[in-house]
Amino acid sequence: MLKIRIVEIAKNKPFFTKELLLKNLPKRLQERAKRYLDEESSMSYSAGRLLLKRALSENGLPASLLEEIGYSEQGKPSFKDHNFSISHSNGYVVLAFSTNFSVGIDIEKKKTIDLKLFSYLFTALEWASILNAKNSLERFYWFWIRKEALLKAVGCTLKELKQLEVYEHYGTYKEKRYYFKSFDFDPDFNGIVATETQTAIAMEFIELKDLLKD
């Protein structure tokens, strides 16, 4: 079972400051959070690491592991022996954590966009599928969140997005298969997780104040 941990920043902003969140993180992570110029991005980063701190604790792992987060050449954050993925969008932050297999997670708020700005990220067949769909925007998001989640699971870059083949329940990268599970946490959002192994998922909504107690 893979647990999807979810915290809503938006409803907590009146009660918590980015400085308060920073106090609960190691010095190294505080410095990374301070690189974000706007408050929401800084708070989302901090909340994601606090969710990760909670996941470590629930798996019997020390919070000191937060100091050992490394980054691949492609910029993917990871531990040496454990896997996690964080996504944030419009006030929500979500985390997928596993001690056994690679994971990638993505959430996106459903909003109107200029589709043609994203055409270069899709193969000709995918783009035709988007344009010919009854609801092109919905079809775009169907592809996009799967590709984003798969990208995070395999640790590649946007330049390789066209190499990610996505289907209803799985996606492939360099002939290796990863499995998709969608999760509904807000009617205005799409959410999906990609895993190296087929597994059931469960959602847990966590209050920001509870993360500050850990």
Image (cartoon, rainbow, N blue to C red):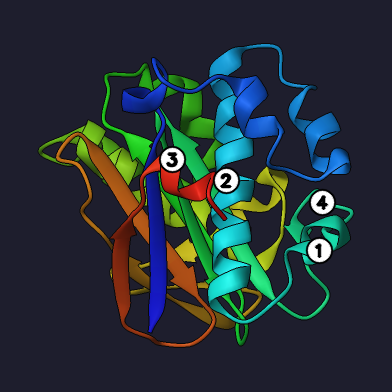
In the image, what residue type sits under mark 2? Answer: Gly
Q: Give the labeled residue for mark 4.
A: 74
Quadrant location of the C terminus in the rendered image: bottom right
Q: Residue at x 38, y 51 (%)?
A: 6
Q: Nearer the viewer, residue 130 or 17?
A: 17
- Can you give x and y, in whole percent of width and height, for residue 78 in the image? 76, 63
**Mark 3 or mark 4: which is in front?**
3
> Is label 3 in contact with label 4 (beta carbons under 8 Å)?
no
Q: Secondary structure at mark 4?
A: loop
Q: Which mark is residue 209?
A: 3
What's the residue type where badge 3 is placed?
Lys
Query: Disc 2 or 3, which lies upstream in sequence?
Result: 2
Judging from the image, what secondary structure is the residue with disc 2 in? helix
Disc 1 to disc 4, C-alpha distance:
24 Å
Identity, as a three-letter code, of the amino acid under mark 4 = Gln
Q: Label 1: which residue?
A: 64
